[in-house]
Amino acid sequence: MNRAAFTVWSCLWIVCLSVSNAVAEPPGSAASLLQPFVEREELAGAVALVAGRDEILSTETVGYADIAKQKKMPPDAMFWIASQSKGMTAAAVMMLVDEGKISLDDPVEKYLPEFRSQMVLVEEDEHHRLLKKPTHPITIREVLSHMSGLPFKSAVEVPTLDALPLATAVRSYAITPLQTQPGTHYQYSNAGINTAARIIEVVTGAPYEDFMQQRLFDPLGMKDTTFWPSEQQVARLAKSYRPDESKQHLVEFPLTQLTYPLTSHNGRFPMPAGGLFSTAQDTAKFCQMLLNEGELNGRRYLSKAAFQELTSRQTPETVKQSYGLGLSVGPDWFGHGGAHATNMEVHPEQGIVIIWMVQHGGFPGKGAQAKNKFRDWALQRYSK
């Protein structure tokens, strides 16, 4: 190859390499990636946060907290995080395991005697129901991993999920037949998580919500995480949206699983499996504690053994769902989503936490893809 040809070839190689690198580089901001979803009315608004082990790496917002009022989504917007509450409740239970006050394989009936006569439904048709004693009493591990056979909720938890005191709700689970034999099937169950929370009350003598506040929320600095948002916090609450009848636009809808007014303590009770409100920043603090294997800012909340139990798969290989204790578990992550599409993921190997805060009961068009677009961007930009 002569010098001129070599020079041309070298220049072309450099240009191709530059183009390749440009394509490989993620967009400069999450907002630039997410804004098209807002413009197409596929996403109302979002707070997208990425955190490392001891710092917030990125917080970006797009769209609206209230479309009708054209209120921009603020970084400190409040969200109903729904089932993300499950992981926080499970972490509180593991604190008692660390203290030797309970064991994961203890039967629930050891602490809640009303479960001693629980039965399992084995046959049912329009003419009869056949009940039998379960092969073994349900355990704390099973109620935290959705393997107990308890239903999602009991028949008396109507019209909302927060209308009964915790002790009353849990007694209703005890008289409800198990849907499957304990330990054999995965049955996503608010009732199970609520039952574990009731054990906290019985063992400590403190209301569940007080235990959460004193042992988790206050020490972590989760100042906006609550079952009863204040008037000021409700003013920051993002509206919930879902597709209209045409499936092309968004329409606002209320939190139908909860009782209004949200600020009231009268007729509204803490719902451990899904009643919490929070912000992206608060949720990130909880996840950072887990990213650091139970420790944050020099304070240990969970032993490493408790952390491993919480974040390791508890469901047997015979079921397809991979679930830990109050947390979904993936091959290289753990976390949980909420009923209105909020999501938190902890990626230990990459050293980051990814928080996705929206309020959606479904999405028009390709709106559901926005979360994964943000997650992929965060992993590409901030992984170690």
Image (tube, helix red, strand yellow):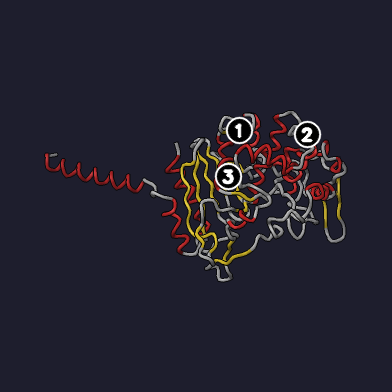
Image spot of residue 86 (x, y percent): 67, 45
Please name the amino acid that badge 3 sits on.
Asp
Q: Quadrant of residue 363?
A: bottom right
Residue neighbourhood size for the residue with mark 1, other residues' Cα within 10 Å, grouped as few (<14), some (14–19), many (≥20) = many
Residue 130 appears anywhere in the view: yes
The foreground one among 16 and 170 is: 170
Image spot of residue 158 (x, y percent): 77, 59
Who's the residue at 59% across and 43% down the image?
335
Q: Earlier in the sequence, mark 1 or mark 2?
A: 2
Which residue lies under the disc numbered 2? 106
Between circles 2 and 3, the one closer to the viewer is 3
The foreground one among 359 and 123 is: 359
Which residue lies under the disc numbered 1? 294
User: Helix, strand or loop at disc 2?
Assistant: loop
Image spot of residue 223 (x, y percent): 61, 44
User: Helix, strand or loop at disc 3?
Assistant: helix
Q: Earlier in the sequence, mark 1 or mark 3?
A: 3
Which residue lies under the disc numbered 3? 282
